[in-house]
Image (cartoon, rainbow, N blue to C red):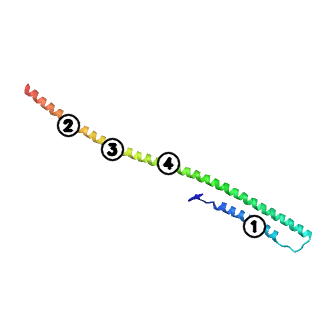
Amino acid sequence: MEAWGVKIMSNELMIVLAAASMASLAGGALVAWVTARQYPGTGPEEEGRRELELLELREAAGQSRRESQAAGQHARARDAELAEAQAHIHTLEDQAAAYLRQYAQAKNMLKAEIRQKTQLQTELAAAGARIESLQARVQEMEMERNAITGSLRRLSA
C-alpha cells in the first residue's frame, strides 16, 4: 500500500520479516559467540565435539539465513500482489465513478425532458382551450349570420 509516496507493508508481512531477521541474527550471534569463546585446554575428542557443534551451529545459521531470504521473497511477492490488487481496486473505483457520472447525466436529462413534456402539455391544453374558444366564437358568428340572413330574406320577400 502506498500513502503519501511511502510504501507500507501489511502487519502480517512485517511480522514474518521481523521473525526471520531475528532468527538469522540469533543464529549468527550464537555462531560468533561459540567461535570466539575460549575453551580451556581439552583433548582431541572434546575438540572434535566442539567442531561438530560449530558445524551444526553454522548449518543452523545458514538455514536461518535461507529462511529469512525466503520470507523476504514471500513478503515481496505478497507486496506485489497487494499493489496489483490495489491497482485493480482503483480501476474499479474509477469505473464506478464514471457510471455514477453517467447516471447523474441521464437523470438530469430525464428531468429536463419531463419538465419539457409538462410544459408542452400545458401549452397543448392552453391551445386546446383556445381552439374550443375560437370554435364557440365561430358558431356564435354563424348563428348571428344566419339570423341576419334570415332577417334579410324576410325583408326582401
The residue beneath circle 4 is: 98
In space, the residues marked 1 and 2 are separated at their CA atoms by: 110 Å
Relative to 92, does residue 148 appear above or below in the rendering?
above
Q: Is residue 147 above or below residue 15?
A: above
Q: Upstream in the sequence, badge 3 or badge 2? A: 3
Q: Residue at x 81, y 65 (%)?
A: 57
Left or right: where 119 falls relative to 39: left
Mark 4 residue crowding within 10 angstroms, few (<14) / some (14–19) / many (20+): few
User: In the image, residue 12 lies at what x, y percent?
Assistant: 66, 61
Which is closer to the viewer, label 4 or label 2?
4
Pointers 1 and 4 in contact (C-beta within 8 Å) = no
Tags 1 and 2 touching, CB below 8 Å: no
Q: Are marks 3 and 2 in contact (CB under 8 Å)?
A: no
Number of the front mark, 1 or 4: 1
Does residue 124 sit above or below 12 in this rendering? above
Provide the secondary structure element on which disc 3 rests. helix
Q: Earlier in the sequence, mark 3 or mark 4?
A: 4
* Number of the front mark, 3 or 2: 3
Which residue position holds label 1?
A: 26
Question: Which amino acid, mark 4?
Answer: Ala
| Residue type at tag 2 | Arg
Residue type at numbered disc 1: Ala
- First reached walking from the N terminus: tag 1 or tag 2: 1
State the residue in front, 109 or 60: 60
Tell me which numbered mark, 1 or 4, is placed earlier along the sequence.
Answer: 1
Instruction: Give left or right: position of 141 versus 126.
Output: left
Give the quarter of the figure containing the C terminus. Answer: top left
The residue lying at 55 percent from left, 50 percent from top is: 92
| Separation of marks 3 and 2 at Cα, in angstroms | 27 Å
